[in-house]
Image (cartoon, rainbow, N blue to C red):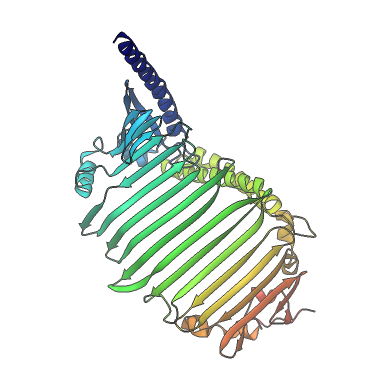
Amino acid sequence: MRKIILAALVLGGLWLGGTYVIGQTVESRLREQVADLELIPGSDLVRLELSDYDAGILGASARTCVVFDQLPPNLSQWQAFSGALCDRTDIRYGPLLFTDDGPALGLAHARGRLDPSALPEPVTAMVDQVFQGQPPITARTLYRFDGGVRVRAAVTPFQVSSAAGRASLGRLTLDARSPRADATTGHFYITGRDLQVGGPLGAATLPVLDMEMTVKELLGDVLPLMDMTLAATGLRITRGGRESFTGNLTLRTRSRRDGDTLAGDLGLWLDGLDGDAVPSTLGSGYLGLAYQGIDSKAAVRAQRLSRELDRLQIEMMVGALADDQVALEANAAQARQLGEELMTVVTRELLRPNKSGMTALVVLDGEDDRQLTLDGRLDYRGLDGLNASLAELRKLPPAGLLRLVDLAVNLDANPALLPPPLRANLAGPMRAGLVANRDGRLVSRLEVRDGDLTVNGESLAPAALMVPGADVPAGP
């Protein structure tokens, strides 16, 4: 009996000691996770702050709040939300956890909910009315032993209607599985059902929304390489009581490493098209785009510069509202400098002569036949095999710009697809030889090779592309 009691005491001590270590680890990870989150990329005007963490033996409770900093007087009313718009989380330590999916092994399991109770009374009353007293957003997080997380978050369904408009939501959930605590890489799923919004000018309905995304890598902590598929089924837009657009949409994007360069593609499928805004001859369509040869280091640098420019633009907006001319001029000067640096990266580093390029394909179909085919290929050659500076590019004449690329574009379209105003303006391009009418179809084949421009087999001067309606002599 004494051995059993002793063993129980030892096991109990190990369990309590384990939960203490787990608690310390979970708190550290949670603080790092909150600190790394950026509500506005590159700016701390709005940030999340772990305002309270009350640790116990078997679990903890945490409070994470939105904090507004450095707001100008014009936006001082937002201070009422600072530290009041919070998430309250109940945490249970592992190693054995009981989750919504059943028993699991892990560091901890957290149940969080958006808590608007500390907001001004008119706001809380409105939130309670919309969400029927339920938390607007809930989240479940499983912290794994390997440092990864699984997150399930959901917006509470709602239905609201007023004189200004109406909106409703049947379901909106996020399921994330990441090998990192900050969830910057991994698998992400968004599911939406019965999304509706309407007002005096019109309404939009989306019965089914599904998105699946895999972020494979985060280059330089700023540029994701990912595969993403989004499907919107049954999209319906009405205006003035009439259907403006109906149809289904599927979008797929993929990006990847190719040695020390980046490559990727994008595809957009449309089907079941109808409505006043859709030509009567059109029923489905496809847009495809592929690229390769983008310098990966330059792409990361360009992304960082873009984020910094976004931050400066936000701060300039705040400075303008606060009438802070000193800060506004300082930020504007820095933005000009970063803008010039970004243009240098784009022109001198991002593309690689004889390696960078892209292809594109657009197909539009009707019930009986193809309405439009547009395909093209562009290969970047550079200026004599080198990247030109922005100053050099600005000095180049149109004929010199054509030397930068090899290009081939083919068009075959049904004239009925074009709206009447556009069809009426075809005379100029046809007179310039850019478009021809063959067997009732609009056709064009444009090629640029070694700086020479040909359209439909005829040599043209580059100025013909700039002023299609003008009479431009042919090139040599």
- Looking at the rendered structure, the number of numbered marks drawn on it comes to 0
Residue 263 appearing in the image = yes
* Residue 379 to residue 440: above or below: above
Q: Is residue 314 found left or right of 108 in the rendered image?
A: right
- Where is residue 82 drawn, in percent x and y? 33, 35
* Residue 9 to residue 33: above or below: above
For the point 64% across and 86% down, the residue is 431
Q: Quadrant of residue 163?
A: bottom left
* Residue 433 to residue 163: above or below: below
Q: Quadrant of residue 165?
A: bottom left
- Residue sitting at the far top: 2
Quarter of the image with the N terminus is top left
Q: Is residue 453 found left or right of 47 in the rendered image?
A: right
* Residue 418 to residue 221: above or below: below
- Where is residue 159 drawn, in percent x and y? 23, 55
- Where is residue 399 drawn, in percent x and y? 74, 69
- Residue sitting at the far front: 1
Q: Is residue 34 found left or right of 264 in the rendered image?
A: left
Residue 64 appearing in the image = no
For the point 47% across and 47% down, the residue is 187
Depth check, front residue: 215 or 303: 215
For the point 70% across and 81% down, the residue is 472
Quarter of the image with the C terminus is bottom right
